[in-house]
Image: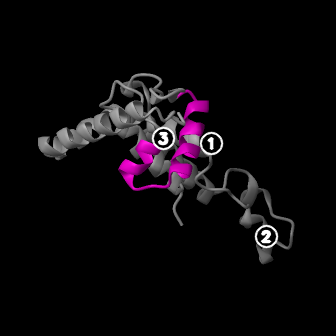
Amino acid sequence: MALYGADVEIGIHTLLCLLRTTQPVSSHELATYQGLSPTHVAKVLGRLQQAGVVASSPGKTGGYLLARSAAEISLTDVVDAIEGPKPLFACRDIRFRCELLAGDPPEWATCSMCAVNSAMKRAESAMRDVLAKTTLRQLGEEFVRKAPPEFLQRASGWFVEHREQRVSSGRPSEP
């Protein structure tokens, strides 16, 4: 089972779509572009908006934009906005249940943090440190280095074309 759910992946990819745009993009356009459920993407964007990661504007020219610079948005910001801070490991103090200790563990068995819990907390700290140090800007730069320029042009053009269609049709954004 994955530590983080699909919503985190959807959120990060959706935010990456917003990196190269200066015009608001509707949640429907973001979902369609990624082949995802519009309802699901709207739900994820709602959480990101509540956390101040994205900003929205209503109306036919409305939609979503990053609320701050991509260099200021860490993966920790995204994970916490979507799923809330959650521990990697929840210690159940199994060491206290050892049959040999008969429900009365001696001090040597309980005087410090369980070694298993300690190792898991160190792992969680290291993972959160990596997430905190990784920004949307860094991920976007990595993608730009990998993707051919033609693809990047097509992607930008796709959003421009769909925005123009939405605006000219008078359909309101959701945002």
Write the residue at 54% across / 57% down. 3
Could you say where residue 147 lies in the image, as x and y percent from the top left? Answer: 18, 46
Q: Given the image, on which type of amino acid does mark 2 rest?
A: Arg
CA gap between label 3 and label 2 equals: 50 Å
The x, y position of residue 123, in whole percent, is 50, 51
Q: Are marks 3 and 2 in contact (CB under 8 Å)?
A: no
Q: What residue type is labelled 1?
A: Gly
**Mark 2 surroundings: few (<14), some (14-19) or many (≥20) residues within 10 A:** few
Residue 97 is labelled as 2
Judge whether residue 135 can be spotted in this image: no
> Which callout, 3 or 1, points at the residue further toward the start of the chain?
3
- The percent coordinates of residue 72 (x first, y second) are 42, 25
Which residue is labeled 1 in the image?
Answer: 84
| Residue occupying the far front of the picture | 169
Question: Closest to the observer: 137 or 62?
Answer: 62
Tag 1: Cα neighbours inside 10 Å, few (<14), some, or many (≥20)?
A: few
Which residues, given as a range, are shown in magenta?
Answer: 28-52
The residue under label 3 is: 27
